[in-house]
Amino acid sequence: MPELPWEAVAGQLEQITISVLRFDARLEASGLAAGWQSRCDMTEAVRALILDGHLVDVGDLVLHDAGMDVRHPTRELTRAAAALRARRTALARPAPWPLSIDGLAALRGIGPVRGEGAHKPTRGKPDPEDDEAYPPFANDADPWRAHFAEIDALLERTSQVLAGETPLPKRRSHLVYDPDQDEAEAEDLWLDVVKRTSHWPAIAAAAVAWNAWLDLNLYTRLPWLGLIMAAAILRARGLTSHLLPLAAGFKQSKLRPQGREGAREKLEGFCQVLEEALAIANRDLDRLILARELMRRVTDKCRSSSRLPELVELFLSRPLVTVPLGAKLLQVTPKAIDLMLAQLGGALPRELTGRTRYRARGIV
């Protein structure tokens, strides 16, 4: 564990903590928390791939997420969708859950998200007419028959494996994975760091956990997951109820870890990332508030059965919106979307593509 000069960094930690709390309170008071988080998740997934050296168009990610791909998904787009799914998974359960073995497995896409596959005990008595509600041989006079049947099935599967009829699971390719790296041991070490810093200030704990993630080189195929876990630690400690855009803050900051920094330099670097992330988050929230006020002046005058307010919410929740996307999500015709866009007038969000066909608009 690093030895931090608490007397020198306490003031900086307090200021950033107050800034995070103020932003979270402002976001909740604005009524745009869900829309801001949805937009943040999509843009963060794109920025995470940029940090890994891959460029993904946010428009392709939005359409891929809605199941409306205009072209065959590329490998980079699939990885961006995995990053988007990981952020949504981290928000789908209570805050401490991502910081566990089950949480790490679900964020990697190899475990259940909401408890799928787990056996849920049934309440009340089962239906006497339903044979599937009872275990095998439940109505037999011999209670040991079911246990012997399970043993026989196990012996049968073992015989098939020994005879070569059932292939053993293949080992991971050494061309892709490092055979000398034990991911299970690295997970235990990282979770131990998180546990040992549970009584530290939240920002210092998140900084140490993120740097430990980089030092352990955990999940080399998912380099963006470390920043998501750092944001999950801030959420678990109660500083915020959302996931902050740390990937955007890291991209904007000048911090590039080299492995030679001291404990204080690493903490100050993470604080710089967090400050840049808060600045970006505040600017995005300002844009959303201004755009909502402009579009509300139009929606307040429309009839009660109009779908225009739903289109406005769609603009607030996604980085860009196309006519086919709006027609699919609102379940109206493309012509109706064109009429509603014309109805917005001067409050219409900016056109982003610069084309006359297949145009997309968004709040930027």
Image (cartoon, helix red, strand yellow):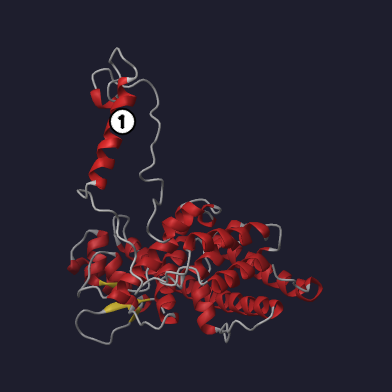
In the visual, does 72 lie left or right of 3? left
Q: Give 67 or 136, whichever is nearer the viewer.
A: 136
Q: Is residue 303 above or below residue 356?
A: above
257 or 260: nearer the viewer: 260
- Left or right of residue 136, residue 196 in this image: right
Residue 60 visible in this rendered orientation of the protein: yes
Q: Position of residue 114 (x, y in %)?
A: 41, 48
Residue 84 image-quadrant placement: bottom left
Q: Residue at the spot x=24%, y=23% of the render?
A: 131
Q: Quadrant of the C terminus?
A: bottom left
Q: Is residue 295 left or right of residue 241?
A: left
| Location of residue 183 in the rendering, given as x and y in whole percent from the top left corner | 47, 63
Of residue 42 and residue 295, the one placed in the foreground of this image is: 42
Q: Quadrant of residue 88?
A: bottom left
Q: Secondary structure at mark 1?
A: helix
Q: Residue tagged by mark 1?
A: 150
Q: Residue at x 43, y 68 (%)?
A: 41
The residue lying toward the viewer, choosing from 197 and 186, is: 186
Q: What residue sits 34% from the left and 76% below the top?
A: 58
**Quadrant of the image occupied by residue 273:** bottom right
Residue 243 rendering spot, x and y as whole percentages? 52, 64
Tell which residue pokes out farthest to the right in this image: 7
Dot 1: within a 10 Å radius of its alpha carbon, few (fewer than 14), some, or many (20 or more) residues? few
Q: Amino acid at mark 1?
A: Glu
Q: Is residue 215 left or right of residue 176?
A: right
Q: Position of residue 270 (x, y in %)?
A: 62, 76
Locate the N terminus and report the quarter of the image it occupies: bottom right
Relative to residue 91, is residue 350 depicted above or below?
below
Q: Is residue 30 visible?
A: no
Residue found farthest to the front: 163
